[in-house]
Image (cartoon, rainbow, N blue to C red):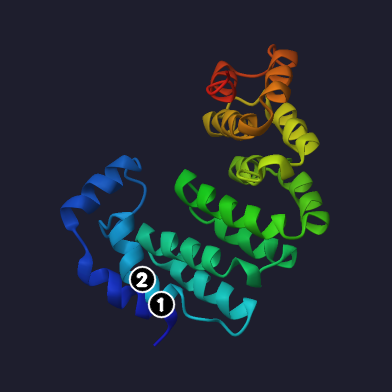
């Protein structure tokens, strides 16, 4: 039995069809769902997700098989799996994460993988950060969003030049999910250096969208 079969064995019996309809509607009827709230899903899958893995290849293969299943909860479990074993991954596996990210992308899976990516790159910033310079110019706005968000939670370890450089590079974009990501990333860093964020927003007020500015300054003193 493959790992994804084992996960299906514990998740599928808990399916809630009525909740699945509501979850699908929330995602604009784009994806199928089992109808499992996150706490229920995580509790059921936890023993399997915590299992040790022999190699990064085996881990990524298991995540990939989960990603192939139609119900979105399997992808969320794949993200939990990668996050749980993130220390097995390195910048050498960024391309594998990107391959998952661009499969039927939406904010739910993109943001989850951006979090995994951030954990992986934080451990090896010298090798990993330049990769995000390519992502920020990627043809897919979802990849650009992930690059914009990957430093969330880095606090004072944030590469401020990249954060502000990426925000400036994307500032003129019309895409809602990019504008939101800019504001989110700036707001997160503002918790640690609010003066720098306020100065950046003031200097780029003519190009930043009102959404980005509003989000960036949401927690200002």
SS for callout 1: helix
Residue holding disc 1:
48
The answer to which image quadrant residue 49 occupies is: bottom left
User: Which mark identifies residue 70?
Assistant: none
Residue holding disc 2:
45
Number of numbered discs overlaid on the protein picture: 2
Asked whether disc 2 touches disc 1, contact meaning CB atoms under 8 Å apart, the reply is yes
Residues 160 and 168: in front is: 160
Task: Name the side, left or right, on which 94 lies relative to 53.
Answer: right
CA neighbours of label 2 inside 10 A, class few (<14), some (14 to 19), many (20+):
many
Q: Quadrant of the C terminus?
A: top right
Q: Residue furthest bottom?
A: 1
Q: Quadrant of the N terminus?
A: bottom left
- The percent position of residue 4, horizontal first and vertical second, equals 41, 76
- The percent position of residue 147, horizontal first and vertical second, equals 67, 44
Task: Name the side, left or right, on which 49 lies relative to 190.
Answer: left
- Asked if 42 appears above or below 139 in the picture, the reply is below
CA neighbours of label 1 inside 10 A, class few (<14), some (14 to 19), many (20+):
some
Residue at 69 percent across and 61 percent down: it is 94
The answer to which image quadrant residue 160 occupies is: top right
Residue 169 visible in this rendered orientation of the protein: yes
């Amino acid at each position: 039995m493959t790992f994804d079969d084992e996960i299906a064995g514990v998740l599928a019996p808990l399916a809630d069809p009525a909740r699945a309809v509501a979850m699908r509607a929330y995602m604009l009827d784009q994806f199928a769902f089992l109808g499992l709230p996150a706490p229920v899903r995580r509790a059921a899958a936890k023993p399997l997700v915590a299992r040790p893995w022999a190699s990064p290849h085996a881990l990524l293969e298991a995540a990939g098989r989960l990603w192939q299943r139609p119900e979105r909860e399997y992808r969320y479990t794949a993200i939990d799996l990668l996050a749980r074993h993130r220390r097995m991954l390195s910048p050498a596996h960024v391309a594998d994460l990107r391959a998952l990210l661009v499969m039927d992308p939406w904010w739910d899976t993109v943001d989850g993988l951006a979090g995994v990516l951030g954990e992986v790159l934080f451990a090896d910033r010298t090798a990993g950060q330049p990769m995000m310079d390519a992502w920020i110019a990627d043809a897919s706005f979802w990849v650009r969003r992930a690059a914009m968000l990957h430093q969330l939670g880095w606090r004072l370890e944030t590469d401020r030049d990249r954060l502000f450089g990426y925000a400036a590079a994307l500032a003129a974009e019309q895409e809602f999910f990019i504008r939101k990501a800019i504001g989110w990333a700036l707001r997160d860093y503002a918790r640690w250096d609010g003066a720098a964020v306020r100065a950046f927003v003031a200097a780029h007020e003519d190009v930043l969208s009102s959404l980005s500015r509003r989000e960036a300054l949401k927690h200002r003193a």
